Amino acid sequence: MINYEENIEVRGARVHNLKNIDVTIPREKLVVITGLSGSGKSSLAFDTIYAEGQRRYIETFSAYARQFLGGLERPEVDKIDGLSPVIAIEQKTTSKSPRSTVGTITEVYDFLRLLFARAGDAYSYVTGKKMVSYSDAQIKELILESYTDSKINILAPVIKSRKGHYRELFEQIGKQGFVKVRIDGEITDITKGMKVDRYKTHDIEIVIDRLKVGQGADFDKRLMESINTAMYSGENVMMVLEEGEKEPRYFSRDLMCPESGISYPTPEPNTFSFNSPKGMCPECNGLGHVYQVNEQKLIPNDKLSIKSGGIAPLGEYKRSWAFKQLETIAQRYNFELDTPIADIPKNALEIILNGGKESFSVNSKTLGVKRDYKIDYEGISNFIKSQFNEANSTSIKRWAKDFMDKTTCPTCGGARLKKESLYFKVDGKNIGELAHMDIVELATFFKELEATLEGNQKKIAEEIVKEIRTRLQFLLDVGLDYLSLNRGSKTLSGGEAQRIRLATQIGSQLVGVLYILDEPSIGLHQRDNERLINSLVSLRDIGNSVIVVEHDKDMILAADHVIDIGPRAGKHGGEIISEGPPSELDQHQTLTAQYLNGSKEIAVPKNRRKGTGKNITLSGCTGNNLKNITVKFPLGKMIGVTGVSGSGKSTLINETLYPIMNAHYFNGVKKPMPYKKITGLQHIDKVIDINQSPIGRTPRSNPATYTGVFSEIRSLFAKTTEATIRGYKPGRFSFNVAGGRCETCMGGGLKVIEMNFLPDVYVECETCHGKRFNRETLEIRYKGKSIADVLEMTINEAVDFFENIPKIHRKLKTIKDVGLGYISLGQQSTTLSGGEAQRVKLATELSKRDTGNTFYILDEPTTGLHFEDIRVLMEVLNKLVDKGNTVLVIEHNLDVIKMVDHVIDIGYEGGKGGGQVIAEGTPEQVAKNTKSHTARFLKNELEETKKIIAKAV
């Protein structure tokens, strides 16, 4: 056994806000790093340990190879000892390509393709019969057996049900030395200049040979030669026709239907790949969906006339070629461009939308002569389609896409593959059906598969099925039983994507690796937490070191070693405030310890709000796995939507409720999932959705620009006396446009010095010293501070500084209220932690004026938040509800669930087993439910809280 060092020693880490810390992390243990959001956990785990591991790996390449990889900066740390190869499993690493699916990331789909190519049975898409394929020797035997002493014609099919006169084809056949052909069932001699009716469909076969079936070596030789020639001319298909018979019998080297004669090429793994031209559906190119023009988007209001902009893509009347065309059509169909679209004749509207060609003449009233007109019109619908498919510019494509809807591909029904590929089956199922199944169902299918396979097929499939089963088991172990293989990786939440990568890593069975995970429990129900922890423990037990950045109570208690970073966040954090096994946490008076031992807690409200008594009722929801459910959302309360992962929470809220509300209040165009009706929308006057998508990921984006407060600050600076005298506009104070910014560093504050063969070095710009603006701009001051000084202020300082300017003060106050008082206004968005970015986004939405009638939807707002951060966040949300607004939270975190007024629990399981409302009411009422998984954990949580209160009293 190799004797590794016992620990990973980090000395003098100073990345971001780390205060020159030394830390010792035991190897081959499960280590949890916890602390407030923004205290420096990710800086230690990812930006120090992982970055150094990566850098050392890249250092092993030759200088030549390194120049293509781009150098990695050395993190600010004195030294790290005992580091093994590092694999980071972060939240934001999945591909956003529409071609990437759960099946392709986990490689299960690759094994499925191999299984179908090697052990699948092919069926004919015409007759549904099993396809057969023969070798030449088998064909010879079959002919000898079936046609003993009969006269037969050996035919090679060249044309199958196609139109044309085929004169050249007959000439070519004649040149090859053949004298007869069979046209539409009749055998005729080839004559000079011979052709057939070009407007009818024909079947044409070459008569290769006519012979009487007998015995002997000479006959065998002749038959084999004829079979070879027929296979060559007929592209691996031939026919045998007995004299006097009408129906020939087909034989093929490839897979072929014995009745209709259609044949498939020999299957290969990429016959089943939707990313290869050999397997993809030709209509949707393997994406499973197509974009179709939506006529309602073209003509949103048919009361308007064409002249006043009734056709959205064309807009109002202008003297242009497009309107000239429409005037011609109007003349032909006797209507005016001032006529409301609803009154235009149907056939004219058909031509306007879908195009047409025709000529007509009109008697000119003024001149008394006939004038000829020609309509050759592409149609608005076709024009938009062609722009979407062929335009080179992204903005034109985006413009065209606004008038289109994404619909399931009509050819492959969303299976992504061409027709032939879907007629290969294993145990009666094609690969598309297997990719649609939940992983639980798929695992059961493969468990039972071995019993049904026989003979050769069993031998071939054995190894492949074993691989598939182990991989599916790992996905089940991390709680992803409700996903299906064809689920696009774009639609996965951060936690799901991470757990898929975790399953893939466990599947690789590496040893001696250091894994670093970033909050893998996001989006995971308490019930599945145990499975996740067991997966991490099994990674550790085979000999790996596992470091997890996590706030989850169960995970902290299951760890071998806990490192707590604090004491506060940002500038006030970055120190190690306790380390050791979880049992020793109580000895330290840290925030984490206080929440774990119950001396501090997020209190359960004494009484639940009654609400306004009004409801929004959504009925008949059937999207994805929802089972025709009806849900009431009581207004004026805080509502929690809970349920195990994959039970249908996001489908109900993000894909049904929000698009309906958005379309109602703001004319949003996203199509909601199917539902029957919704009532009560009149009680609310706007909806605000705060989801998981990241905020700007460029160094030029910062909290001030993202929340929009920077525009207000710039306007304020532009109004100062000095700025007015100089004629400066707000744009002068932007570091993104020429004028006010420092031109040396283009307003970045840093300059990149490119070093060949070494990582690029960032140095402070020598002209502006990192201030981002030029000297003239910095001379403008407000209350003694320049615009650069304002960007360097922390939010706490800025709140006091701008307290007399309500517009600015309100936005900054919200950022402070969500617990981000420590970040500076100009801090680059790229350096914000996940939890911080989520709250900047939250603050931006919360700072919009609420009407006392606003409906807020928050999707897992506790992502990346420590217990203390959750307490602060809940205070903000409670204030909103106290003003009469409604806040709906999709959440797994029990600290949030126990504080809401109304819980809607969806279950029972994930995937097919979910999609029903199983409990609703106050947390106390829901906790009494015996079947709900959430209720079980909620009950314990409420009892714990009671015990703590009793202790305190």
Image: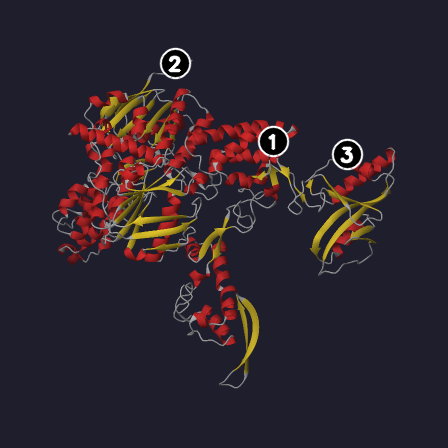
1 vs 2, front mark: 1
1 vs 3, front mark: 1
Q: Examine the rendered structure and indicate whether residue 187 appears above or below residue 236.
A: below
The residue tagged 1 is 452
On residue 24, the disc is: none
The residue tagged 2 is 3
Q: Examine the rendered structure and indicate whether residue 272 appears above or below residue 397.
A: above
Cα distance in 3D space between marks 1 and 2? 48 Å
Q: Quadrant of residue 943?
A: top left
**Residue 612 image position (x, y, % from top left):** 24, 51
**Residue 762 image position (x, y, % from top left):** 29, 36
The residue tagged 3 is 137
**In the rendered structure, which amino acid carries the disc numbered 3?**
Ala
Q: Examine the rendered structure and indicate whether residue 561 appears above or below residue 268.
A: above
Q: Along the polypeptide, which appears first: circle 1 or circle 2?
A: 2
* Residue lying at 16% horizontally and 52% vertically, measured from the top left: 806
Q: Along the polypeptide, which appears first: circle 2 or circle 3?
A: 2
Residue situated in front as seen by the camera: 836 or 397: 836
**In the rendered structure, which amino acid carries the disc numbered 2?**
Asn
Q: Secondary structure at mark 3?
A: helix
**Mark 2–mark 3 CB contact (< 8 Å):** no
**Residue 233 image position (x, y, % from top left):** 75, 45
